[in-house]
Image (spheres, grey):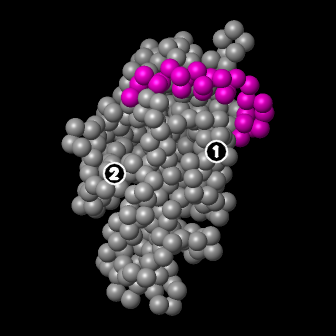
Amino acid sequence: MSKPGSGLTHRPLTEADTPAVLELLTASLAGGPTGTRSAEFFDWKHRRNPFGHSPGLVAEDADGRLAGVRLFLRWQWRSGGRVIPAVRPVDTATHPDFQGRGIFRELTLRLLEEVAGDTELVFNTPNGNSLPGYLKMGWREVGRVPIAIRVARPTAFARGVRGVLARRPAGTSRPVACPLERAADWFGGPCTGLAELLRERAAADVTDTRLAVRRTPEFLRWRYGDAPGLDYRVLTCHRGGELSGLAFGRPRRRGPLTEFTLADVIVRPGDRGSAARLLRTAAARARRDPAAGHPAAGTAPAAAALRSGYLTAPRTGMVLAARTPAGPLPADRSTADWRFSLGDLEVF
């Protein structure tokens, strides 16, 4: 057993470690996107992922006390017809009693070595505090992913933005009401036309070499239908009686604001009409202000977004950082090489 810090050893994460890991993550990162770090959510995220189980390492002291944890979420991108296996660094924490011993760096580099044999790409969206550490470990800042928003009530939205900037609390912890159908309920039905829509979409995307998430019915069900506590909703549209598009999103609070985050919009190739219908319906029926998303450049949703009232918000978005398990990405790689939605990069 090698030593990631004085008096510490590291070993693979096991299922028996879950309670201690959840306690450590809660102490370091609070309750996460659902407000509470549950074993159900952890199992869904790291063990039921259709792309594979999450590899993980823990550091512990001589008494078996957990000092740190590091996990990589399995992911799959597609470039044309080729599948690119990837991982996303997530859920890392160091116990306050063990900080300053290089645990984060050691576990991260060790885990990179472990996934090198079956992984081509490592990507994540670090915040301003963690980005410098990743850059020192060989990550490269690929670029910023902008967010497009549609505002229905400008005056109320402006007041809410001022509240967010002033870091005013939401004023209530109650779930955000939303009349849209729950994704879990939709996936509980026949999902008529979904497999055909995805096959048609995949066939058209073979000529696009940008990296796009490998979407399958199983992945979408896991990502949006089975996610415990994330309250994803679904919108569908039909043309000639057939499913022509669908969108997934969720209502959420940002201080005094409530927004509807459009995680994914999927339509038949070139169907700007269905894309526009989904974008407008999401903004109107969700009854949240604003509606926010990231329609990838060169797609039908992107072409429909501007016509549907979505504008790129200044000084927003996430920083995308990436590397290969062996080292930095080529210097000419940029966000233009990706075709992702907001749900592909959303922290969950």
Q: Residue at x 78, y 30 (%)?
A: 190
Residue closest to the far top = 240
Tell whether 330 sits left or right of 34. Answer: left
Q: CA distance from mark 1 to mark 2?
A: 26 Å
Over which residues does the magenta segment extend?
184-209
Disc marking residue 222: 1
Which of discs 1 and 2 lies nearer the camera? The answer is 2
Amino acid beneath label 2: Thr
* Badge 2 element: strand
Frontmost residue, 260 versus 190: 190
Q: Position of residue 237 (x, y in %)?
A: 65, 19
Left or right: where 286 falls relative to 343:
right
Residue 193 magenta:
yes
Is residue 249 positioned above or below 17 on the image?
A: above
Q: Is residue 128 above or below residue 260?
A: below
Instruction: Classify 10 Å Cα crowding around label 2: few (below 14), some (14-19), many (20 and above).
Output: many
- The circle on residue 156 is none
Q: Amino acid at mark 1?
A: Trp
**Residue for point 38% across, 64% down:** 113
Q: Nearer the viewer, residue 22 or 220?
A: 220
Q: Tell me the residue at 47%/90% (across/down).
A: 62
Where in the figure is residue 221, as x and y percent of width and height?
Answer: 66, 40
Q: Position of residue 267 (x, y in %)?
A: 56, 21
Question: In the image, 320: left or right of 81?
Answer: left
- Which SS type dominates the magenta stretch? helix
The residue under label 2 is 324
